[in-house]
Image: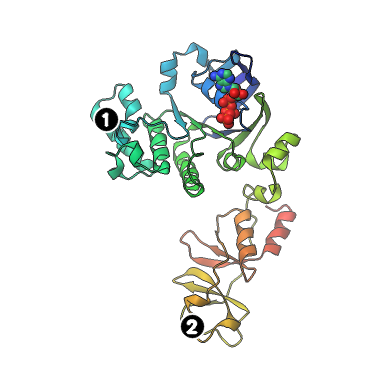
């Protein structure tokens, strides 16, 4: 557990970047620090590994004040990832990842083996090992940054806007990979971002800071959306809070409906419903408006507008599947992607309204 006790940082010149911050960061979870530019997120993060010293107050890790620890020893137990990865340009990918193990005095073979292992775990293929950072995409560089921070297996990971400089698709991949890794690793992660949706997605708890380095609210994502502490937090959370909160509530027991389906090459029956779902090898391909089909169904008849939700999806995803379906019936699939039934938005909304979620 990392604790901030009434921590203040005033820079020379008088800027108070962090003001009386008290915050508990639980072990094995992700805490997202979020807020507008200049609210003191980076300063707070860097005080944990003593890259910046507080003016007043105490920061402790598992009850030990960080000020009493030797800075180099402290940092060996703390991985650090920054925007643009901050890789060493003249070292290969493998040597970048092996940096901390080498600093710890591990021999070359053990360091390289650890680096190769972490490269694989963050989704980097082995053939990238001998490249230099400039020969990688932005997303690959960020993965190297994460592998480097994890290479000596520190219990704490500090991440400062690590995914801000990559395009939205890669960013989404990196976010889901971080969640997948964290489900295995259970690190204590402090994740700085200015993007509230990223904070809500990744954080087990989200700490919202306002300019002047004042903590506005700390809460679990669902609680933050359900009960913003004040207008600043409500404005910062933005619109669609009811819809976004559906990502965090449990799924009610869904009324799944069976569906008459068609395969490609089949002719819709005479008494076919208006819309029929086309399924091949168990996998849903799209809907067809049966009145528009000339003879047998082929791929040009398919309407692919509907999203597909899995049985483990959140109510938000299931609602989206129902509302985006031209048949107004949301397609549900199992873990293998096989069709299991359809759901109606109205029925889901009724259950959610009744608080059965
Ligand atoms: N070395 C410094 N000397 C003086 N002022 C500083 C220094 N570093 C940061 N500041 C100021 O402290 C305040 C907080 O900065 P900090 O970088 O911690 O905020 P942030 O929330 O991470 O911002 P951003 O999202 O823009 O990176 C800002 O007003 C900034 O200008």
Could you say where residue 123 lies in the image, as x and y percent from the top left? 38, 44
Quarter occupied by residue 235 = top right
Could you say where residue 314 lies in the image, as x and y percent from the top left? 60, 53
Q: Is residue 62 visible?
A: no
Name the residue at 63% across, 61% down: 254
Q: Residues within 10 Å of mark 1 (few under 14, many from 20)?
A: some
| Residue 33 as seen in the image, left or right of residue 175 | right
Up/down of 191 relative to 197, above or below: above
The number of discs equals: 2
Name the residue at 52% across, 34% down: 161
Sequence-first tag of 2 and 1:
1
Label 2 SS: loop
The residue that label 2 is drawn on is 266
Which quadrant would the N terminus be assigned to in this image?
A: top right
Q: Quadrant of ligand 1?
A: top right
| Residue 123 as seen in the image, left or right of residue 110 | right
Could you say where residue 332 lies in the image, as x and y percent from the top left? 56, 63
Disc 2 and disc 1: Cα gap in Å? Answer: 60 Å
Name the residue at 49% across, 84% down: 296
Q: Which residue of the protein is positioned furthest toward the top in this rendering?
A: 68
Name the residue at 72% across, 34% down: 232
The residue that label 1 is drawn on is 110
């Amino acid at each position: 557990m990392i604790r901030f006790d009434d921590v203040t940082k005033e820079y020379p010149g008088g800027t108070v970047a962090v003001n009386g911050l008290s915050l508990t960061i639980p072990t094995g979870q992700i805490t997202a620090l979020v807020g507008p530019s200049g609210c003191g997120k980076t300063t707070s993060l860097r005080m944990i590994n003593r890259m910046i010293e507080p003016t007043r107050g105490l920061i402790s890790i598992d009850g030990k004040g960080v000020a009493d620890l030797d800075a180099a020893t402290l940092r060996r137990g703390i991985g650090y990832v920054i925007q643009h990865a901050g890789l060493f340009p003249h070292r290969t990918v493998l040597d970048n990842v092996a940096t901390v193990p080498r600093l710890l005095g591990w021999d070359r073979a053990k360091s390289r083996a650890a680096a190769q292992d972490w490269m694989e775990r963050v989704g980097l293929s082995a053939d990238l090992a001998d490249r230099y950072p400039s020969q990688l995409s932005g997303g690959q560089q960020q993965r190297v940054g994460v592998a480097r921070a994890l290479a000596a297996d520190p219990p704490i990971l500090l991440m400062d806007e690590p995914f801000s400089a990559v395009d939205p698709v890669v960013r989404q991949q990196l976010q889901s990979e971080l969640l997948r890794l964290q489900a295995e690793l259970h690190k204590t992660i402090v994740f700085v971002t200015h993007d509230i949706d990223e904070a809500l997605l990744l954080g087990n708890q989200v700490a919202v800071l306002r300019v002047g380095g004042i903590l506005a609210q700390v809460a679990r994502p669902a609680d933050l959306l359900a009960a913003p502490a004040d207008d600043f937090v409500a404005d910062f959370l933005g619109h669609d809070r009811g819809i976004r909160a559906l990502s965090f509530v449990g799924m009610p027991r869904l009324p799944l409906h069976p569906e008459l389906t068609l395969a490609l090459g089949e002719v819709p029956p005479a008494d076919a419903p208006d819309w029929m779902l086309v399924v091949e090898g168990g996998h849903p391909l799209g809907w067809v408006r049966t009145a528009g089909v000339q003879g047998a169904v082929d791929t040009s008849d398919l309407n692919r507008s509907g999203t597909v939700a899995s049985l483990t999806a959140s109510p938000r995803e299931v609602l989206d599947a129902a509302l985006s379906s031209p048949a107004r019936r949301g397609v549900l699939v199992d873990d293998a992607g096989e069709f299991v039934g359809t759901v109606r938005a109205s029925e889901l909304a009724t259950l959610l309204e009744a608080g059965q979620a």
